Image (tube, rainbow, N blue to C red):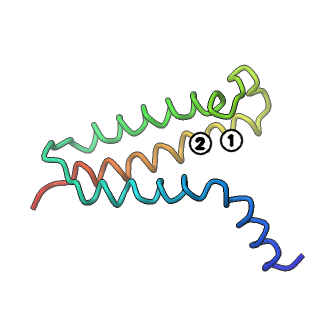
Amino acid sequence: MSIESILVVLFYSAKPYLWLIILLLLIPVISYLIKLPVRLINSQINMLSLVIGALVALAAPYITYSKLAYVNTLTDWLSLFAVLVGATIYCWFTLRLLFREQN
């Protein structure tokens, strides 16, 4: 299978979720443009990002019409941990843009 064929399959797999991907890319851009006057220190942003990432990881099985009790294997736990890390990094990046210092 050529790389071009793989890219075509990936595109058609992602096509139903294209609106969600665009929304996820627009949120940091909008948070960069808003720049809230409230100032949060780095530790508060880090903790808030970690809490939101943990909540997203706990909600991920329910979003996919599954249950947290079905997370049994090491692969399942690693996937859930990857969701936690990804959501935490995305939230940290967005919050850093939203609550940055005003110059």
In this rendering, the answer to whether 36 lies above or below 15 is above
| Image coords of residue 71 (percent x, y) | 74, 27
Other residues around mark 1 within 10 Å, as few (<14) / some (14–19) / many (≥20): some
- In the rendered structure, the answer to whether residue 18 lies left or right of residue 52 reads right
Check disc 2 and give the amino acid type.
Val
Q: Quadrant of residue 81?
A: top right
- Residue occupying image coordinates x 36% and y 51%: 94
Check disc 1 and give the amino acid type.
Ser
| Image coords of residue 39 (percent x, y) | 16, 44
**Residue contact at pointers 2 and 1, CB within 8 angstroms:** yes
| Image coords of residue 21 (percent x, y) | 54, 57
Other residues around mark 2 within 10 Å, as few (<14) / some (14–19) / many (≥20): some
Which residue lies under the disc numbered 2? 83
- Residue occupying image coordinates x 37% and y 56%: 28
In this rendering, the answer to whether 103 lies above or below 71 is below
- In the rendered structure, the answer to whether residue 89 lies left or right of residue 69 reads left
- In the rendered structure, the answer to whether residue 30 lies left or right of residue 40 reads right
Disc 2 element: helix
Disc 1 element: helix
Total label count? 2
- Residue occupying image coordinates x 39% and y 39%: 49
Q: Quadrant of the C terminus?
A: bottom left
* Numbered tag placed on residue 79 in the rendering: 1
| Image coords of residue 48 (percent x, y) | 35, 35
